[in-house]
Image (cartoon, rainbow, N blue to C red):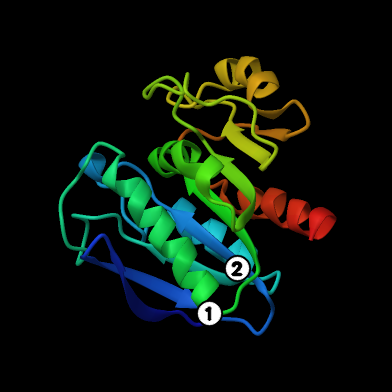
Amino acid sequence: MKEERVSFKSNGLKIEGLISESQTRNGVVVTHPHPLYGGEMHNNVVESVVRAYGQKGYTTLRFNFRGVGRSEGGYDEGNGEQEDVRAAVAYLCGLGKTSIDLAGYSFGAWVNAQCIQSLTDVKRMIMVSPPVNFLDFSFLKYCAKIRLVIAGSEDDIASPAMIKDMIPVWNSEAEFNIIKGADHFYCGKTGELEAVIGDLVDIEG
């Protein structure tokens, strides 16, 4: 799959992204880990999520949050970043995508979770290693759009035990997949991660 550089505006800020466009109506926005800890759209897990969706015929859009890479602005503690997510979803809508997923890894999952209820164009959300040991998820109540949550068995930032307790609150029908032997960074485990995501897309379309 070939990606091309794109940019879109988020509250007047120019945000840079990479898109691989398919001819289907399906699209996904993928968000990256914490900007203050080196998170950006070229992260290995972000690339795995993009690859998993791309292999299923989705248009994929990953982007750098404000203040990261060539995206204008600065880190905004997850607030302005929600506007970036909304702008990315709107960008896919503008391309005629009518079935849109939202997938986030770590900090990206936290940002996505904060704005998912207002994103009427998003049909489904996937959370990879939501950092429940590091960031506050108490705001997140029942959300039917949460379909899949993934964590590594050795992850001390997105503790599987803590996530397991939260799933019934988030959505008791969501699939929770623990990848054995994986830590927060999925070193050597990205193939398994892609397979889990691909299975969900196959089942739910």
Residue shown at the point (51%, 71%) measured from the top left: 92
Q: CA distance from mark 2 to mark 1?
A: 10 Å
Above or below, comparing residue 3 to residue 149 in the picture: below
Q: Amino acid at mark 1?
A: Leu
Residue 172 horizontal/vertical position (percent): 75, 25
Residue shown at the point (48%, 57%) measured from the top left: 30
Tell me the number on the disc at residue 139: none
* Closer-to-camera residue (86/103): 86
* Closer-to-camera residue (83/109): 83
Please indicate, yes or no, whether residue 198 appears anywhere in the rendered image.
Answer: yes
Q: Are marks 2 and 1 in contact (CB under 8 Å)?
A: yes
Q: Earlier in the sequence, mark 2 or mark 1?
A: 2
Residue 89 horizontal/vertical position (percent): 48, 62
Mark 2, residue position? 27
Tell me the number on the disc at residue 95: 1
Q: How many marks?
A: 2
| Image-quadrant location for residue 108 | top left
Please indicate, yes or no, whether residue 186 appears anywhere in the rendered image.
Answer: no
Q: Amino acid at mark 2?
A: Gly
Q: Of helix, strand and loop, which one carries label 2?
A: strand
Residue 37 horizontal/vertical position (percent): 24, 40
Marks 2, 1: nearer the viewer? 1
